[in-house]
Amino acid sequence: MDIWRALLWGLVIVGGVAALYGLHRLCLWLERRGLLYYRHKKPSSSAASCLVALQKAFEPQTQNVLQIKDEKRHHSEEEAPSGGDAPGSM
């Protein structure tokens, strides 16, 4: 009976390795489709970003701050006015 027990453990180990390899290939396939961050692609945001919607519900004033930070300035707003009052212009 000892040989049957060794054979059973050998099959369990081989089956476990095969199952892990299959899971690895499945995760790589899901990553290629964009459904999972696994090995090659890193997430662009943190885990705390899922709580932003909850924060917006409890603290609506923070939404205004986030909105202002996201706005982009135009080049015309960033440049100084080109009037004759600037020092060094003749």
Image (cartoon, helix red, strand yellow):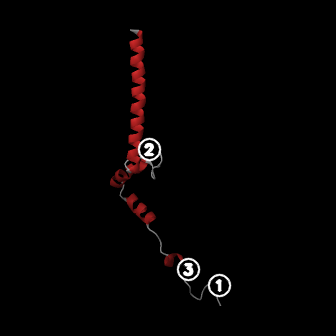
Work out how far the residue at label 2 is from the one at label 1, CA to CA, in angstroms: 58 Å
Q: Position of residue 38 (x, y in %)?
A: 44, 44
Outermost residue, bottom side = 90
Is 18 situated above or below 44?
above
The numbered mark, 3 or 1, whose residue comes first in the sequence reads: 3
Work out how far the residue at label 2 is from the one at label 3, CA to CA, in angstroms: 48 Å
Q: Is 89 left or right of 55, judged from the image as shown?
A: right
Is 25 situated above or below 84?
above
**Amino acid type, mark 2:** Tyr
Regarding mark 1 in the picture, which secondary structure is present there?
loop
Q: Residue at x 65, y 84 (%)?
A: 87
To which residue does mark 2 refer?
A: 38
- Foreground mark, 2 or 3, reads 2
Labels 3 and 1 touching (C-beta < 8 A):
no
Is 34 situated above or below 81?
above
**Amino acid type, mark 3:** Ala
Q: Position of residue 82 (x, y in %)?
A: 56, 85
Q: Residue at x 66, y 85 (%)?
A: 88
To which residue does mark 1 refer?
A: 87
Q: Residue at x 42, y 44 (%)?
A: 28
- Foreground mark, 3 or 1, reads 3
Residue 80 has which mark?
3
